Amino acid sequence: MKPVRPGDLTPAKPPEARMTRRSLLLGGTGIAALSVGGLAAYSGAEAATALLVTRYKLSPRGWPAGRRLSITVLADIHAGGPNMGIERIRNVVDSANALRSDIILLLGDFVATHRFVTEHVPGPVWAAELARLSASLGVHSILGNHDWWFHQAEIRASLKAVKIPVMENQALLLGPQGARFWLAGLGDQLAYPQPGGGFRGIDNLPGTLSQVSTDDPVILMVHEPDIFTQVPDRVSLTLAGHTHGGQLRLPLVWPALVPSEYGARFAYGHVREGGRDLIVSGGLGTSIVPLRLGVPPEILRIELG
């Protein structure tokens, strides 16, 4: 069941023309509009101070009846000020641990790369905070596009140092006997920007799912939700980040700001298509501009079964 939240709209078909958050910045007119007085102040405060726990309860296809699993999801931390300094990250970790979920999943984009960063948070520092995350079935991560584009070696080293595994086109069988499930982590779909435009990903969905060797259900971690159109019925639940829920839900224009080929279709929340389930986190940090409007930073708490 999808929670009812202000500004949460029914997914729409992909628009024929679409801006991106990057074009909003480069175009100039969007920034000018967003920086007007109270709107900018409110949006900055929402990014820096709000923190929601958004809860979902569902029994997706292929998930055994009565088999309970709780999942905490942190996506798009984008460590760095002004809205994601070290004290803020510490608060996020404390809030996540307080949920006492069976497993914690980190869906990539660990460091802020926009020009408005005011507090540099070194890799070992934010990673030390994430090392405090605790769950009986562990803490698992994937990388996002910003991790690939900026500081990849440092991010990998920081996560490795605190023993948080990075899953790239890998599947792992978890859980006790009789309650096992597969956790799969997909490589990033936008890993390599191409000289002529576009991107080349390292994602290998068939290769990842070929590692699933039992009938136990599958949970798939992806950074960008667009891959959902290719996810087979074998996967019970796909979890994604990247979109920030649109980040700036300005009336009428916000679907054009979603960094997805499908506009608002996979922008945010629980999406069910063809009996398959996707949950897209609104994320925690910000990209391009340190503002949020109508989609506050959030931690996901998902209960299956």
Image (spheres, helix red, strand yellow):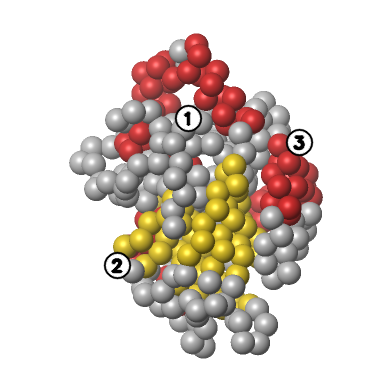
In this view, the residue in front, 39 or 35, is: 39
Of label 1 and label 3, which has the lower sequence position? 3
Question: In terms of image quadrants, where is residue 297?
Answer: top right
Return the residue at label 2. Answer: 274
Q: Quadrant of the N terminus?
A: bottom left
Question: In terms of image quadrants, where is residue 8?
Answer: top left
Of label 3 and label 2, which has the lower sequence position? 3
Circles 1, 3 touching at the beta carbon (< 8 Å): no
Q: Which residue shows up at 75% across the image and 60% down it?
A: 134
In this view, the residue in front, 42 or 228, is: 42
Q: Which residue shows up at 29% across the image and 67% down it?
A: 274
Determine the CA span between mark 3 and mark 2: 42 Å
Provide the secondary structure element on which disc 2 rests. Answer: loop
Q: Is residue 207 left or right of residue 140?
A: left
Return the residue at label 3. Answer: 87
Q: Which residue shows up at 54% across the image and 21% down it?
A: 42
